[in-house]
Image (cartoon, rainbow, N blue to C red):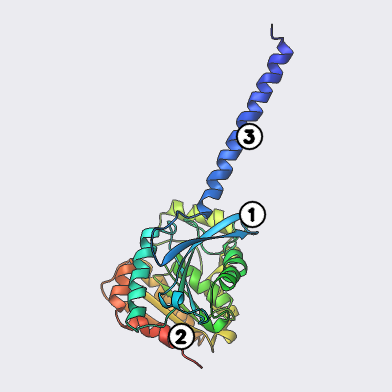
Amino acid sequence: MITGGLKSRMKILLLLCCLLLAHTVARAQVQAPWVLPDINSPRVKRVLFDSAAAKQQVSCYVFTPEPYDRSTDQRFPVLYWLHGSGGSSAQAVMSHTRRYAAAMREGKMPLMIIVFPNGLPNGMWCDWKDGSIKLETIVLKELIPHIDRTYRTVAAREGRIIEGFSMGGYGSARLALAHPDMFCAASPMGAGPMQPEFTETPRASPRMRERLFRSVYGGDMDCYRALSPWKLAEVNAANLRSGLLLRQIVGEKDETMPNNRAFHQHLEQLKIPHTYRELPGIPHNPDQVLDALGEDNWKFYVEALRKK
């Protein structure tokens, strides 16, 4: 016969087991997005590295051009390409690398390694206010050093370009403007959010905006401002007036266009050199942006890596 006291202890033990299981499942759900699915491509591989900031392994995709395998001493510049909201897609990465690999084979752009970091579905490419996500730390202090140790890179500012679309455009702008000593060029495309205040999101609902505002910036507008490309351009204007090749691209029919245009005007007022281009008839779509740029796209990388 089971006594009342034993029944109570068994209920408590069962409750603790359930709580432990729920915690384990929840933790796995939080951690899982750091590791991207494997990829089936001859020139692209998934790379895993240990991250102290994430307290687990983190992944990225890495493309190497064909000559990388034939040469044992040649070093290659690196293009860091940041994805938009929704997360990194193996299909999008393969499509992107096919486009760039063809341009390299045809001699239209310099040979380079392309790294596609994992910015999580809505990581915003920054360190969150509560410290739970540290994407800027991971990219700058862990990923880039790991790539430089693992691959034959030009391991210096002169050999690094950062580019991205949408959320990735925001990330590429803020990382380059905050750390112009680490990149020789930056190319934000269809970037957002680029406005000085996070009071509206042209491509997201008010509910999504509020969720992002609270999870990433802790509901603190001062935190958002401090991390924004708008403020970083003001703070680092003197250092940004020479050295960084900055290209800003947005489609004319992109909902982020008004904020991108305002940011372009902000850079002009700060006398920060850059090129700005609105693509007629193009919506918020990275493939259509690259199609519209055409041959002009490759000239940016040539100029970025030209010997000064």
Q: Nearer the viewer, residue 70 or 19?
A: 70
Secondary-structure class at tag 2: helix
Residue type at mark 1 is Lys
Q: Earlier in the sequence, mark 1 or mark 3?
A: 3
Secondary-structure class at tag 3: helix
Q: Label 2: which residue?
A: 304
Asked whether, in this view, residue 237 is left or right of residue 9, the answer is: left
Q: Label 3: which residue?
A: 20
Residue type at mark 3 is Leu
- Residues under labels 2 and 3: Cα distance? 52 Å
Are discs 1 and 3 less than 8 Å apart at CB?
no
- Residues under labels 2 and 1: Cα distance? 35 Å
Residue 15, quarter of the rendered image: top right
**Residue located 59% across and 86% down the image:** 238
Q: Earlier in the sequence, mark 2 or mark 3?
A: 3
Q: Nearer the viewer, residue 271 or 124?
A: 124
Is residue 254 among the parts visible in the rendering?
no
